[in-house]
Image (spheres, helix red, strand yellow):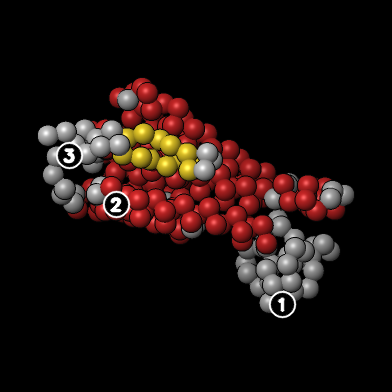
Amino acid sequence: MAPAADMPGYWGTPTSTLDWCEENYVVSYYIAEFWNTVSNLIMILPPIYGAIQTCKDGLEVRYVWSFLGILLDELPMIYSCCVFVYCLYECFKQERAVNYLSITLLLTFSIIVSVLNKCINILSVLCMCRVYPWLRALGFTSLSVFLLGFVLWNIDNIFCDSLRATRQRLPPVVGAVTQLHAWWHILTGLGSYLHILLSLQIRSTYLKHRPKVKFLCGVWPILHIESQKAS
């Protein structure tokens, strides 16, 4: 479907089997879905920073892959969920060993039962919040942000025609706020990031580090490890 609001663009008429609710080439002649494109930066820049910081802190490589998994956009719905679960269940090991059985089982699960990935995330966070009650705020925030993004994604799909009609009557800046698929990128990217921070905080606490969530530039949450394991 090519709505009347679409504009001609540098790359021509979209041929993808999926054409999201955002009008094509309205903001930029060179970018078909501008807001959907720029909103993906939250799935690129913070994960790269998180992966680098994890390496500097000397934590296991699985947390690096957790951050980099966000870069895959659609695939984290399946793969990152399993990485999160693996990280959470490996938090209480003394040695840096790779559990190949767990990896095989989770990989198989991700391929066969992708629909259950969000349920696994919710259950794992709830379990860990029972063990560490002071992490409930971070855990519930990660779940709430992720679920809100999922709700907005469904609204964008179901009520697309109404949203497009509404945007025609709104100023461009205000209309940009109604790009719910872009909000889906932002909220799921943030929710995934917060979930990894939760896992990192649990692991570093178990290793007798002193983790603390701080805010970069007063806005973006990062995990700061104040000191190494006590001798």
Q: CA distance from mark 3 to mark 2?
A: 20 Å
Kind of residue indicated by mark 3 = Lys
The crowd level at tag 2 (other Cα within 10 Å; few <14, some 14-19, many 20+) is few
Secondary structure at badge 3 equals: loop
Q: Residue at x 54, y 40 (%)?
A: 219
| In this picture, residue 157 sits left or right of residue 6 | left
The crowd level at tag 1 (other Cα within 10 Å; few <14, some 14-19, many 20+) is few
Which numbered circle lies on residue 93? 3
Residue 207: x, y in percent?
Answer: 21, 36
Residue 158: x, y in percent?
Answer: 69, 47
Residue 190: x, y in percent?
Answer: 51, 44
Which numbered circle lies on residue 56? 2
| In this picture, residue 73 sits left or right of residue 169 | left
Q: CA distance from mark 3 to mark 1?
A: 54 Å
Q: Camera-side residue: 144 or 114?
A: 144
Of tags 1 and 2, the one toward the viewer is: 2
Sequence-first disc among 3 and 2: 2
Residue 31 vertical position relative to residue 150 in the rendered view, above or below: below
